[in-house]
């Protein structure tokens, strides 16, 4: 059924200037739409499996042992969170931006070929992200910790293929002004681009791996800035642009307030850039850093709500339309969820609240509400709006769409509500002290009490996934029944140069009146005339965003990154030994920080449960930090030094429930069966040494860097193996001596964690000796 | 909302804009959240003593330690003390919570043993009399299989109380207990 949607009476009427005829580039929009739906299904399915693994850690225990490393919870979780951001959300962003950009500029894309390359390159990059995460080629960052070639690829495609094309299309536009949606797109392009490019700054080790330029507290601050920037400017800012476009289009009413949209845009963009460090409360970063993040986070409440106000007030008076149009209905729910999550974001930046809920499922509930409720519903609404327009068909079966809507709602609630409860239960059980000031519950008891909630969540993901399948059916039927060739209709519009027409400057009512010149200038400024001018100058607008985003980032990061003195040094802290480095790489590549944090916060119950509070100086050799943000398992910051014997760790890695009944930790038996690999050790230590880690690089006669440090590693492995054997453990595991297994390196690393403070201060000239503290 | 204010003249792909004023409640709440910043900074970052998180934590820890031990003071690590506290359920319960936090991963939730020996039977590896338990907990045993806890526990009393709890386990019947290690020893002295 043909729909004629692009009728735009007010555009053509009364304008006698020459008309252009042109078409929109919609083929690429259709491709991105398909990719969005496809990746959406993949991401929700991954969420389903990863959460199923938490309720049933033995799900894959009968799988072949060589496949085991690829099916742990950590791998699924890392995949799900990265792909949801960069595959699901990003493709939705590309879809919506490419569609609305052309309409709002009344021009076809600047360069179609670039857009197609963008499409193909991005999907290939996402597949390589998935492969490298599953393989364990991780740089140890929760967001986008993938090998450097992929990182550079992602940054390059974002900036050069997406960003450039969008900006050039704006330059070519036929409209006089840039509409507010376009401002949000520009902010997203600039900030995500900045984050992605900055994420590539690393020091190379070998061909594919690299180590972070920054270590410890500095890395933590940089990462918090990065992850906050990426998440906000990928799943919030562009989608607010979509609110400004798709909501007024759907209800066919004017936007509620132009003034509010200006205040909204600048306040939300500038404050969001500043509030990253709110993730770092109670960690050993300088306190003013996290205070700065908190205060900006609190201020962000109203700017975030400005989007909700502008969206819902635009609809107000036409609620009938919400009933009629599925697209609008999805978007209204998305906006309401956003109203909740954005307020919650502000609350979650308050220190006292973070003390209670950080590391619990509460924060997971928050991010799932954002992903499934806000980003998901906005995407669905947008797709249901686009389908009839891109494929020139009516959505075939509206009762199916109706079902999708309710499945999505029920799925969302079944995921999020149990998580809030689980978070509340965890927070209470972790922190509850008896009358005599003692912990009431152990970690495992708290874990046991949330597992029923986790089952409900699995069910919720299933329901939500079912809804996505219905979306898939709707898209497929549009694909099948839509016209086969459809290059958009010819559009009349103002000719290219009409955008340069000067409008009469408005004068202040105060001009010529007996007031100070200043007052009339101020009056003019408050009339936002200056902003109106800006809206006609994309390059100037872009530069203003670039300067303010970079400037604010610089102000936050410079004092921490530039001065080592911002982190008090601790003399007894030593670099990791070669074997511990190998073990740390295993910890990183297995994604242990998906479940284990590594900072004990200055809170009474935490120091009772996990040991002495962490200090910034303890992490100076951590590249990158492994502080984590969840505690599905206990904190590991003080697990070293034989709190559990090495034999205990050996057995625990092999079969966790045997050592800790009711644990959700999967078996890492494959580490017992894989050979200790010391291949890249020399390159890694050379790189770390160049970064200033004090390794003794002097060589004796006939020694190479490789042989020296491999020798040290093997020696320490023998010491730990002897320790395990002495404690009653096996000498060999399936015909491999235990000193030659990967598990030994991981145990060396765990036994090292948090032991620096009790170590005697070394004499500076002593070469690193790996075995003295471990001798029996 | 009453959209009394006329739309801007331009339109974008059919979208027009009202120039409605910013809602007043919005403006004032925004101003309010901004006002938090100077007030908070003044209260917590003006250099006043006791305002930082770590200082708060230290005060809370001191308070917590007082709460834990104000009734009993510093315990002497000897047999009469242990025999005395074996009769005090309130204090064996404290020992139990220390046990739960630190010992169950090797000795089992009920003390029935796992990698570590069973603590409920009459056989002991390194223990002949009650204070030996404190000694083993503080100094460790078995080549690090049993770690030394002296520096890890928050207070010397903790080692005494958890030893009392371990002593009280003797004779209980845990599920799936491990077989006896070491050799049987005489019953604990009666009070």
Image (cartoon, rainbow, N blue to C red):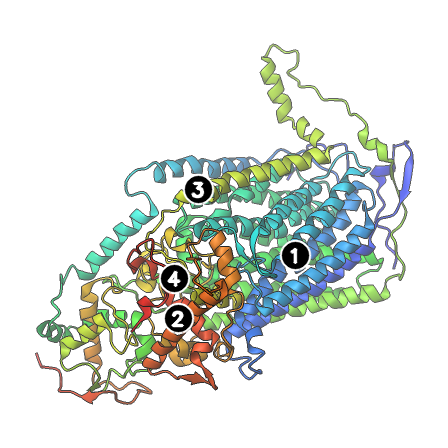
Residue under label 1, please give it. A89
Residue B85 lies left or right of residue A686; in this view the side is left
Marked residue nearer the N-terminal end (1 or 2) = 1
**Residue A771 percent coordinates (x, y):** 35, 68
Circle 1 — which element? helix
User: Image height check: is B141 above or below B155?
Assistant: below
Q: In front: mark 1 or mark 3? A: 3
Which residue appears farthest toward the top when viewing the image? A514
Q: Which chain letter goes with mark 4? A: A
Helix, strand or loop at mark 4 = loop
Residue at left offset 48%, top offset 37%: B34
Q: Earlier in the sequence, mark 1 or mark 3?
A: 1
Same-chain check, marks 1 and 4: yes
Query: B13 left or right of B167?
Result: right
Please tell me whether mark 2 sits on a helix, a strand or a loop. helix
| Pointer 2 residue | A716
Q: Give how far across and how far down residue A93 sits, in percent.
A: 69, 53
The answer for how far apart the CA atoms under marks 1 and 4 are is: 34 Å
Figure quadrant of the N terminus of chain A:
bottom right
Residues tagged by mark 3 and mark 4 found on one chain of the structure: yes
Instruction: Using a 10 Å C-alpha cutoff, classify the residue at mark 4 as few (fewer than 14 neighbours), some (14 to 19) or many (20 or more).
Output: many
Residue A235's place in the image compared with A34, above or below, is above
Please state the horizontal and vertical placement of residue A79, each as a whole percent of the image: 59, 65
Q: Give the mark nearest the N terminus, 3 or 4.
A: 3
Residue identifier under label 3: A563
Asked which quadrant contains residue A440, the reply is: bottom left
Q: Is residue A323 visible?
A: no
Determine if residue A396 is in view.
Answer: yes
| Front tag of 3 and 4 | 3
């Amino acid at each position: 059924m043909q729909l004629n949607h692009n009728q735009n009476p007010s555009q053509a009427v009364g304008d006698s200037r020459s008309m252009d005829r042109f078409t929109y580039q919609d083929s690429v929009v259709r491709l991105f739409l398909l990719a969005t739906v496809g990746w959406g299904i993949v991401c929700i399915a991954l969420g389903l499996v990863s959460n199923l693994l938490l309720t049933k850690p033995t799900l894959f225990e009968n799988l072949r042992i060589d496949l085991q490393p690829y099916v742990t919870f950590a791998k699924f979780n890392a995949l799900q969170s990265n792909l949801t951001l960069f595959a699901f959300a990003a493709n939705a962003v590309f879809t919506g931006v490419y569609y609305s950009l052309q309409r709002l500029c009344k021009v076809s894309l600047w360069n179609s070929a670039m857009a197609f390359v963008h499409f193909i390159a991005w999907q290939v990059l996402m597949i390589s992200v998935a492969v490298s995460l599953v393989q364990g080629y991780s740089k140890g960052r929760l967001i986008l910790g993938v090998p450097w070639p992929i990182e550079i690829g992602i940054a390059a495609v974002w900036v050069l293929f997406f960003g450039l094309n969008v900006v050039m299309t704006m330059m070519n536009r036929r409209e006089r002004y840039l509409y507010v949606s376009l401002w949000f797109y520009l902010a997203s392009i600039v900030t995500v681009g900045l984050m992605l490019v900055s994420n590539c700054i690393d020091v190379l080790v070998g061909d594919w791996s690299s180590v972070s330029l920054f270590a410890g507290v500095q890395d933590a601050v940089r990462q918090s800035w990065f992850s906050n920037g990426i998440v906000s400017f990928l799943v919030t800012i562009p989608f607010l642009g979509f609110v400004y476009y798709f909501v007024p289009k759907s209800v066919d009413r004017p936007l509620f307030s132009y003034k509010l949209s200006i205040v909204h845009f600048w306040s939300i963009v500038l404050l969001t850039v500043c509030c990253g460090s709110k993730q770092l409360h109670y960690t050993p970063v300088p306190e003013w850093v996290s205070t700065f993040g908190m205060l900006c986070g609190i201020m962000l409440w109203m700017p975030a709500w400005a989007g909700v106000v502008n969206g819902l007030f635009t609809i107000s008076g036409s609620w009938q339309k919400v009933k009629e149009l599925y697209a609008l209905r999805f978007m209204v729910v998305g906006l309401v969820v956003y109203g909740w999550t954005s307020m919650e974001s502000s609350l979650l930046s308050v220190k006292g609240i973070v003390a209670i809920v950080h590391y619990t499922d509460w924060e997971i509930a928050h991010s799932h509400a954002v992903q499934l409720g806000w980003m998901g519903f906005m995407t669905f609404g947008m797709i249901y709006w686009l389908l009839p327009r891109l494929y020139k068909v009516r959505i075939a079966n509206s009762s199916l769409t109706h079902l999708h809507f309710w499945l999505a709602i029920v799925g969302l609630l079944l995921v999020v509500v149990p998580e809030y409860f689980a978070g509340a239960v965890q927070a209470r059980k972790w922190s509850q002290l008896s009358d005599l000031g003692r912990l009431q519950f152990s970690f495992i008891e708290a874990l046991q009490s949330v597992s029923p909630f986790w089952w409900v969540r699995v069910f919720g993901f299933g329901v939500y996934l079912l809804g996505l399948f219905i979306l898939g059916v709707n898209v497929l039927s549009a694909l099948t029944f839509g016209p086969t060739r459809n290059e958009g209709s010819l559009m009349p519009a103002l000719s290219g140069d009409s955008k340069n027409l000067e409008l009469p400057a408005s004068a202040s009512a105060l001009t010529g009146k007996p007031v100070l010149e200043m007052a009339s200038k101020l009056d003019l400024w408050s009339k936002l005339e200056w902003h109106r001018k800006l809206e006609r100058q994309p390059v100037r607008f872009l530069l203003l965003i670039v300067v303010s985003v970079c400037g604010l980032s610089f102000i936050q990061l410079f004092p921490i990154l530039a001065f080592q003195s911002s982190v008090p040094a601790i003399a007894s802290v030593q670099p990791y030994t070669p074997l511990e480095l190998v073990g740390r790489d295993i910890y990183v590549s297995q994604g242990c920080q998906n479940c284990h944090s590594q900072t004990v916060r200055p809170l009474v119950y935490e120091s009772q449960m996990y040991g002495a509070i962490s200090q910034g100086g303890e992490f100076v050799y951590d590249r990158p930090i492994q502080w984590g943000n969840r505690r599905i398992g206990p904190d590991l910051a003080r697990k070293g030094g034989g709190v559990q014997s090495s034999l205990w760790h050996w057995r625990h890695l092999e079969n966790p429930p045997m050592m800790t009944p009711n644990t959700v930790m999967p078996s890492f038996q494959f580490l017992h069966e894989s050979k200790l690999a010391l291949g890249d050790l020399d390159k890694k230590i050379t790189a770390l040494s160049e970064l200033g880690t004090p390794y003794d690089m002097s060589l004796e006669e006939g020694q190479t860097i490789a042989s020296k440090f491999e020798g040290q590693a093997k020696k320490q492995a023998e010491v730990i193996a002897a320790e395990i054997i002495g404690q009653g453990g096996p000498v060999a595991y399936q015909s491999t001596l235990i000193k030659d297994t990967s598990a030994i390196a991981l145990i060396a690393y765990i036994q090292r964690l948090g032991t620096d403070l009790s170590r005697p201060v070394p004499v500076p000239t002593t070469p690193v000796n790996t075995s003295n503290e471990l001798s029996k | 909302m009453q959209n009394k204010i006329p739309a801007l003249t331009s339109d974008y792909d059919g979208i027009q804009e009202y120039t409605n004023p910013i809602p007043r409640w919005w403006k004032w709440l925004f101003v309010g959240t901004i006002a938090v910043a100077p007030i908070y900074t003044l209260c917590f970052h003006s250099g006043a003593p006791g305002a930082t998180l770590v200082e708060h934590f230290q005060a809370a820890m001191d308070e917590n330690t007082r709460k834990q031990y104000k009734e009993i003071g510093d315990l002497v690590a000897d047999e009469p003390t242990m025999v005395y506290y074996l009769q005090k359920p309130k204090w064996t319960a404290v020992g139990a919570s220390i046990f739960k936090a630190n010992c169950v991963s090797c000795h089992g939730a009920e003390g029935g043993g796992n990698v570590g020996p069973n603590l409920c039977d009459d056989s002991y590896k390194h223990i002949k009399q009650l204070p030996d338990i404190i000694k083993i907990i503080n100094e460790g045993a078995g080549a690090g299989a049993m770690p030394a806890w002296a520096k890890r526990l928050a207070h010397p009393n903790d080692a005494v109380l958890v030893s009392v709890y371990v002593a009280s386990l003797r004779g209980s019947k845990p599920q799936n207990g491990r077989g006896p290690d070491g050799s049987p020893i005489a019953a604990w002295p009666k009070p």
